[in-house]
Image (cartoon, rainbow, N blue to C red):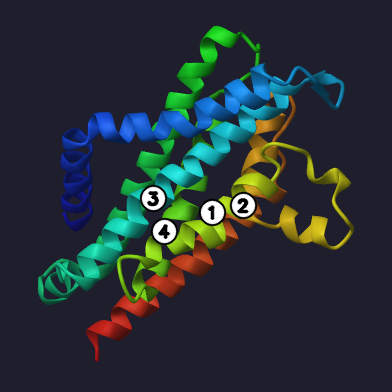
Amino acid sequence: MGIVTVLWEKWVEFRRDFYKITVAAMISPLMYLIIFGLGIQTTSHGEPYLHFLVPGIVSMATMTGSFSAIAQNMSVQRLYEKALDQVMVSPTPLWQFILGQIIGGSLRGLYAGGVILLLTIPIRTDLIFNGLSVFIMFLNGTVFSTIALVLSFLAKSYTDAPRYTAYIITPMSFLCNTFFSTDQMPAGFRQVISLLPLSQTSAMIRSIANGQPAGAFGFIILFAYLIVFGVISVVFIYKKKNL
């Protein structure tokens, strides 16, 4: 019941701000598609650059959509509205509250990725996006929703959320196999970047889009991040309850 309640709150928020959320999900990825994909006519790995770019932008959209849906809202609710304190004294199981937040954020990320897929239909890239692609997008959203949840617990003020975006989300957006391949990066740095969740998401969605298997390693990485940050969020919220 607690999960449904949280998801209903997210749904009401989505309906209220539908146009704002949709436009925000479209603007940056659309600019990247126009400038890098259509404005710069080049190839990557012997294929049109758009074949490389579109899966990367879709992956990035799921990341930013899910992260932004949780980070700032939870920071404001925890620090100023004291919503977290109200949840703690309510009969709602805390794990249900956490799971509802993660699912709600991941659905927002999935919506952002879906918007980008719709925008790319007229381009006719002949890329393949199937049910497994959707699952990977959703899984990526859960990872970044969980990361956003942990960071919102650590935030000291509502201004910390934009800082987290600048420190974490923006670098990953450009480095993690989205706009260019990591193959040419220096040894060591390349391996570290490849272990980040967005790198694996981009690689898996790009493999599927080009008719190749996604591979199991990316799923292992994403589930590892999900478990680690999920445990941290649970420990934080139960520790706060017992203070």
Q: Is residue 210 visible?
A: no
* Foreground disc of the pair 3, 4: 4
Determine the secondary structure under disc 4: helix
Q: Amino acid at mark 2?
A: Met
Q: Amino acid at mark 4?
A: Pro
Which residue corresponds to the image point at 56% horizontal and 51% vertical from the top-left?
170
Q: Amino acid at mark 1?
A: Ile
Left or right? Give the position of 131 relative to 40.
left
Q: Amino acid at mark 3?
A: Ser
* Foreground disc of the pair 4, 2: 4
- Density class for disc 3 (Cα within 10 Å; few <14, some 14-19, many ≥20) is many
Residue 117 screen position, x and y as percent: 50, 22
> To which quarter of the image does residue 25 belong?
top left
Q: Nearer the viewer, residue 159 or 215?
A: 159
- Density class for disc 1 (Cα within 10 Å; few <14, some 14-19, many ≥20) is some
To which residue does mark 1 refer? 169
To which residue does mark 3 refer? 68
* Residue contact at pointers 3 and 4, CB within 8 angstroms: no
Of callouts 4 and 2, the N-terminal one: 4
* Residue contact at pointers 2 and 3, CB within 8 angstroms: no
Which residue corresponds to the image point at 66% horizontal and 39% vertical from the top-left?
178
To which residue does mark 4 refer? 162
* Residue contact at pointers 2 and 1, CB within 8 angstroms: yes
